[in-house]
Image (cartoon, rainbow, N blue to C red):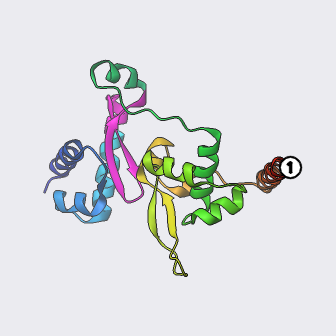
Amino acid sequence: MEIKEAKTILEAVLFAMGGSVGIKSLAEAAGQDEETTKKLVRSLADDYEAQGRGMKIIELEDAFQMCTRPEYYENLIRVASQPRKYVLTEVLLETLSIIAYKQPVTRLEIENIRGVKSDHAVNKLVEYGLVEEVGRLNVPGRPILFGTTEEFLRNFGVSSLEELPAMGAEQLEEFKQEAEEEAQLTLDIQEG
């Protein structure tokens, strides 16, 4: 099969599927091995970039997705129904950060780090599609393990968790101090 035809097939599949498509499925559709398929999809993404197209192809772990360029979002919402908007409060961002950096993680581990109950925050993040159940811990009670989703990667503009910024010792100390202050404040309120 000619390279141009394989790229055209990949473009058609990515367009038609709408969501992310695993590299294995793309390779099957194009009749290529996975490594060649990755190169072809990345080349197609480069073509879109070079041509200044309204679409782009993003890489998400071992999958690819065709999507609208963010700079055309305002134009898109003029004709499409309003996309679902959600607000990530400080509490939700803090909880999401813990899950992103510590995954897989249980609610109890999240609560131990934050020093407060986190049921509502975790449930909201699941509702928003940013966090999902990734398994169960093999201990009595079999607590749910949570991890981030492809939607998390898409929303934060990273293709894998390895692209998340590294946490420095200074940041960790700052977080620890904030958590201790929050725990002390909670304790003071309960005693008062």
Q: Is residue 155 magenta?
A: no
Which quarter shows the N terminus? bottom left
Residue depicted at 60% across the width and 38% down the height: 89
Q: Nearer the viewer, residue 117 or 97?
A: 117
Apparent side of residue 22 relative to residue 149 in the rendered image (left or right): left
Residue at the (27%, 20%) spot, across then down: 79
Q: Is residue 60 magenta?
A: yes
Residue under label 1: 188
> Where residue 109 appears, x then y in whole percent?
64, 65
- Looking at the image, which residue is at 52% across and 71% down? 143
Q: Position of residue 23 (x, y in %)?
A: 30, 60
Q: Nearer the viewer, residue 121 or 148?
A: 121
Residue found at x 58% / y 57%:
99
For this view, does 142 lie left or right of residue 59?
Answer: right
Count of numbered marks: 1
Residue nearest the viewer, comparing 140 with 181: 140
Please provide percent x and percent y for residue 106: 57, 66
Q: Quadrant of residue 117?
A: bottom right
Does residue 124 appear left or right of residue 82 in this picture? right
What range is drawn magenta here? 47-70
Disc 1 crowd rating (10 Å Cα; few below 14, some 14-19, many 20+) is: few
**Image spot of residue 178 (x, y percent):** 80, 49
Determine which quarter of the picture holds residue 77: top left
Residue at the far front: name it. Answer: 192
Give the image quarter of residue 70.
Answer: top left
Q: Which element type, helix, strand or loop, lies under badge 1?
A: helix
Question: Of the residues shown, which amino acid type is indicated by label 1?
Answer: Asp
